[in-house]
Image (tube, rainbow, N blue to C red):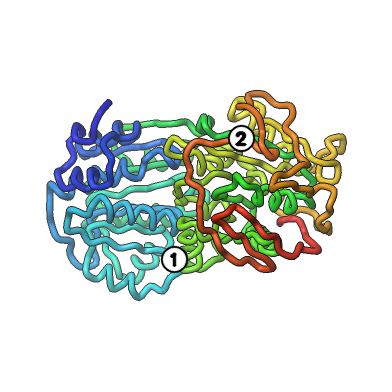
Amino acid sequence: MTQFTELGLAEPVLKAIAAEGYTKPTPIQEQAIPTLLEGRDLVGIAQTGTGKTAAFVLPLLSRMASNPGRPVSKAARILILAPTRELAAQIAESVRVYGSQMKLTTAIVVGGVKPGGQVRALARGVDVLVATPGRLLDHMETGAVNLSGTEAVVLDEADQMMDMGFLPAIRKVMKAIPTRRQTLLFSATMPKEIRSLANDFLRDPAEVTVATVSKPAEKIDQAVYMVKGTAKPRLLAEILSEDDMDRAIVFTRTKHGADKVVRYLANEGLYAEAIHGNKSQNQRIRALDNFKKGKAPILVATDIAARGIDVDGVSHVVNMDMPNLPESYVHRIGRTARAGKSGIALSFVGNDERGYLRDIEKLIGRKIDRIDLDEDMALDLSLPEEPGPHTKQSRGGGGRSQGGGRRQGGQSQNRNRSGGGGGKGGYKGGKPGGSRDGGDRSAARSESGGGGSRQGGNGQKRRGKPNKSWSPVS
């Protein structure tokens, strides 16, 4: 197998890689690095978790090490565009780590924070600028940054930037950069709009493709609950209370829904943090930091906010609301089973989400196992389906009943696995697999949440005062 030392990277970059303990590149790194070291443009089609960030950071830093120079005031030698603040921060951290043996200057330009510090950093000039398109355009319009000397530009998660409406901003940014540049475009998917973008801005690009989006990692054990919308919060609290839950990401369709889930879980004695576009930059950084450190074992997120989240040891992904795009399902559950570990992905399917489930199963080419629920929680499949897509579910009450929520010895007694093909074995507590490889359990969780607390160390959980009413996530 190829070693990093065989790819032609500069010595300072190789030293930084060795200091991190890496010796062998991932498939996309092995394909992309030699091409990028030649100065060619490149289109990379790869999901998160494939090592794509290092696939462009390493060769760009290596070329900079081989051609040292000091950036002039308000200039940036390398520009990296990302759709979200979280992804921008993750990329900047990679630049810091792999550029640790070089005298690099870097800056992050994102929304949600006051621009003064960014303006001061840009005034000195930087080697690497990581930015979101909107805030970068703001600084360009005020004259705080000048891209006329930029040597290379990366469009990371291009499909997500397009989904978020950044295409006009991207075009304005690209027009300000010299045509004699190296341009890299990375995307999880390659719809015709992204192909058109590549044709407009890249010159005879090489193309590398790794891990198509329709194939989730083999070590992700997937299952589905056909559940009433009003019963989703109660079911979620039961799953997250079970002993084999180490660290979970819960996906909701909306920002409001994410906040409601956090409040409900707090009333159940489960500490969670929410991350979405309505949160300030500092709130998002704190929430993600608490999740990474294990202070908050549950992170509730929307799809857009989750781009850039790369946390080891996520044991569970729960789709509280089903995504309306089947590709988003694969992106979501790919947050678990990283670095050779196994993971569990559970999805709650309401009556108006059954069509989404069919689309997902068609994409991944298999039927996902169903888990039976007690009658008070189970969806009546004889009812006609409600239309989708939708953004709001009908409101309704629904306290926490005793019938569907019985647990003994920390294990739920109301769910059994049934139907579906391609399962990987038995269930413990209504969820896939009785054991998992890897993923150290957090031994010291002690966080208060609303009416109760979750305590770790001995694995015991004290439940808070139940929430007496709930409106379905919207």
Closer-to-camera residue (77/345) = 345
Q: Horizontally, is 429 left or right of 396 in the view?
A: left
Q: Name the quadrant containing residue 299.
A: bottom right
- Label 1 sits on residue: 111
Left or right, 138 with reference to 442: left
Where is 140 relative to 327, above or below?
below
- Lateral position of residue 26 relative to residue 266, left or right: left
- Report helix, strand or loop for mark 2: loop
Task: Say what amino acid the circle numbered 1 marks.
Answer: Gly
Q: Residues within 10 Å of mark 2 (few under 14, many from 20)?
A: few
The x and y percentages for residue 214 are 53, 31
Residue 22 versus residue 70: which sits nearer the camera?
22
Q: Residue at x 70, y 38 (%)?
A: 430
Tell me where residue 358 appears, x and y as whole percent: 69, 32
Q: Are marks 2 and 1 in contact (CB under 8 Å)?
A: no
Say which residue appears at 72% left-offset and 39% top-offset: 225
x and y percent of residue 130 in the render? 34, 57
If you read the primary sequence from the N terminus, does the residue marked by circle 2 or circle 1 appear first? 1
Residue 109 higher or lower than 438, as above or below: below
Q: Quadrant of the N terminus?
A: top left
Tell me the number on the disc at residue 154. none
Residue 144 or residue 232, whichever sits in front: 232
Q: Is residue 14 visible?
A: yes
The percent position of residue 161, horizontal first and vertical second, equals 46, 50
